[in-house]
Image (cartoon, rainbow, N blue to C red):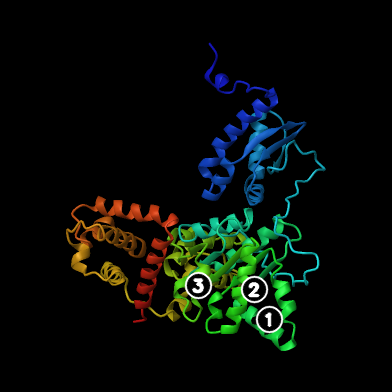
């Protein structure tokens, strides 16, 4: 009787024996890779298709250019080892895109074509964008608070002008909006050689526009910026109150959008809350995807600290990362600043990083930070009631009205996320008899958040309302 694994791996029509062996080897390698891979890695690894073997070269197809960079950086060595083991001989791995119809020879390179919207050769020169080489997708920690924004940024690179155009990123300062803009810009330039990319703040745009008016070079200004392949603008809220700059940006936006050029912008507020910005601009910002970036949760804060320590070549004990993550909640910038201070303290005293050293080094920092009012379940419930203009009795009562149940679910979600209280305590605060009801409500909101921008904005408004109440004691 034929063994089960042989029946599974029988040759397909027109398939060579080597290709069949590679297909089986890749399936086995994937079984080893997926359980310990990150969410981003799993998405790319599962999309890989084994093409074939020529001499010692294994060709794996992955159509996403960014995906090929990601897998090459994070998993190429491990893939090579696993395939060599399963194939029974030493091989090297080549990751190719959809444009490759054969196995590349060692001297061949896969060239990614520029998108259809390409700058005219006669366009005025652009200054090279000043990107920080450390702010890439590879160094970006992805979690619940930024997963949608990061995925949308990757989609902008892979299908420029076709998906999420414009992409509008918003969130409080220090949460990673600028990092994501730098990552998008650098990935775009890596994929599309010679692309014209503009990365600037809204403040720099206003200064450039005023200078063009004063020098009588407004036509050159317009020609320069209307010929770009990717437009990245930070701190769009700075346009508020600057009517002529808004007018100019409105026409620039329309020209780029009509030409199919991708636009990515960031702000500390969602478009609808940008007071002093014209309605016609705000409505255009909302015609693509608005993705919020929220403060990182506890686990993500630990991951950020560990990643920064690894980049700095510093051994950071996990208990120290947990200590810092527990003390510093506000934003990524504050987290990294605290770690930088700890590393400097360790270097100054020539002492390894430990929990005792962390407490000593951060004592002044934590004392200087103004204490916040305690965050309680009551304060979360009050903020939710204010957001939806309902009474606490309506929220915690027995009503099953269609408009009350979703609000109750949001309250359960916010209570768990912001206080970390037990399911039983949350159920008691919401006057529910069974804590499993609260668990179900939490899951409902958590599942909706990635695909419901209106819900994300609502949750962010409630979060901001609560943060404003956290006044120093």
Q: Badge 2: how crowded within 10 Å, few (<14), some, or many (20+)?
A: some
Residue 468, quarter of picture: bottom left
In the image: residue 107, left or right of residue 101: right
Location of mark 2 (residue): 200
Question: Is 70 situated above or below 206?
Answer: above
Spatial separation of the CA atoms under disc 1 and disc 2: 10 Å
Image location (x, y in percent) of residue 303: 51, 58
Sequence order check, earlier mark of 3 and 2: 2
Spatial separation of the CA atoms under disc 1 and disc 3: 22 Å
Location of mark 1 (residue): 208
Judged by depth in the image, the label closer to the viewer, 3 or 2, is 3
Q: SS at mark 2?
A: strand
Location of mark 3 (residue): 282
Judged by depth in the image, the label closer to the viewer, 1 or 2, is 1
Image location (x, y in percent) of residue 359: 46, 71
Image location (x, y in percent) of residue 442: 33, 55
State if disc 2 and disc 1 touch (CB < 8 Å). yes
Q: SS at mark 1?
A: helix
Spatial separation of the CA atoms under disc 3 and disc 2: 19 Å
Q: SS at mark 3?
A: helix
- Checking the image for residue 253, the label placed there is none
Judged by depth in the image, the label closer to the viewer, 1 or 3, is 3
State if disc 3 and disc 1 touch (CB < 8 Å). no
């Amino acid at each position: 009787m034929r063994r089960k694994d042989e029946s599974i791996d029988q040759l397909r029509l027109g398939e060579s024996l080597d290709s069949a062996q590679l297909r089986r080897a890749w399936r086995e390698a994937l079984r080893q890779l997926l359980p310990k891979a990150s969410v981003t890695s799993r998405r790319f690894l599962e999309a890989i298709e084994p093409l074939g073997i020529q001499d010692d070269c294994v060709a794996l197809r992955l159509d996403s250019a960014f995906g090929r960079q990601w897998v090459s950086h994070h998993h190429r060595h491990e893939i090579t080892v696993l395939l060599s083991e399963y194939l029974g001989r030493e091989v090297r791995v080549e990751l190719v895109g959809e444009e490759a119809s054969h196995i590349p020879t060692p001297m061949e390179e896969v060239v990614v074509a520029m998108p259809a919207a390409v700058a005219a050769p006669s366009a005025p020169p652009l200054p090279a964008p000043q990107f920080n080489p450390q702010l890439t997708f590879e160094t970006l920690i992805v979690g619940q608070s930024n997963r949608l924004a990061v995925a949308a940024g990757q989609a902008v690179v892979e299908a420029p002008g076709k998906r999420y155009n414009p992409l509008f990123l918003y969130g409080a300062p220090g949460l990673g909006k600028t990092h994501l803009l730098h990552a998008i810009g650098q990935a775009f330039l890596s994929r599309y050689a010679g692309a014209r990319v503009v990365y600037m703040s809204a403040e720099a745009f206003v200064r450039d526009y005023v200078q063009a008016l004063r020098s009588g070079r407004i036509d050159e200004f317009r020609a320069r910026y209307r010929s770009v392949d990717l437009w990245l603008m930070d701190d769009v809220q700075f346009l508020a109150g600057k009517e002529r700059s808004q007018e100019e940006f409105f026409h620039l936006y329309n020209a780029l959008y009509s030409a199919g050029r991708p636009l990515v912008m960031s702000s500390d507020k969602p478009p609808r809350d940008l007071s002093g910005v014209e309605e016609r601009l705000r409505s255009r910002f909302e015609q693509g995807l608005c993705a919020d970036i929220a403060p990182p949760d506890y686990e993500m804060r630990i991951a950020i600290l560990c990643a920064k320590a690894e980049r700095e070549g510093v051994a950071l004990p996990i208990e120290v990362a947990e200590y810092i993550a527990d003390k510093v909640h506000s934003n990524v910038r504050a987290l990294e600043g605290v770690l930088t201070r700890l590393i400097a303290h360790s270097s100054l005293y020539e002492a390894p990083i430990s929990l005792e050293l962390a407490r000593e080094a951060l004592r002044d920092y934590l004392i200087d930070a103004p204490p916040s009012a305690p965050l309680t379940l009551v304060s979360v419930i009050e903020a939710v009631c204010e957001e939806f203009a309902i009474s606490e009795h309506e929220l915690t009562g027995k009503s099953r009205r269609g408009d009350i149940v979703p609000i109750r679910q949001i309250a359960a979600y916010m209570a768990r996320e912001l206080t970390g209280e037990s399911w039983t305590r949350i159920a008691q605060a919401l006057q529910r008899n069974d804590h499993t009801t609260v668990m179900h409500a939490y899951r409902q909101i958590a599942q909706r958040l990635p695909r419901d921008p209106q819900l994300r904005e609502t949750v962010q408004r409630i979060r901001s309302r609560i943060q404003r109440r956290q006044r120093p004691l």
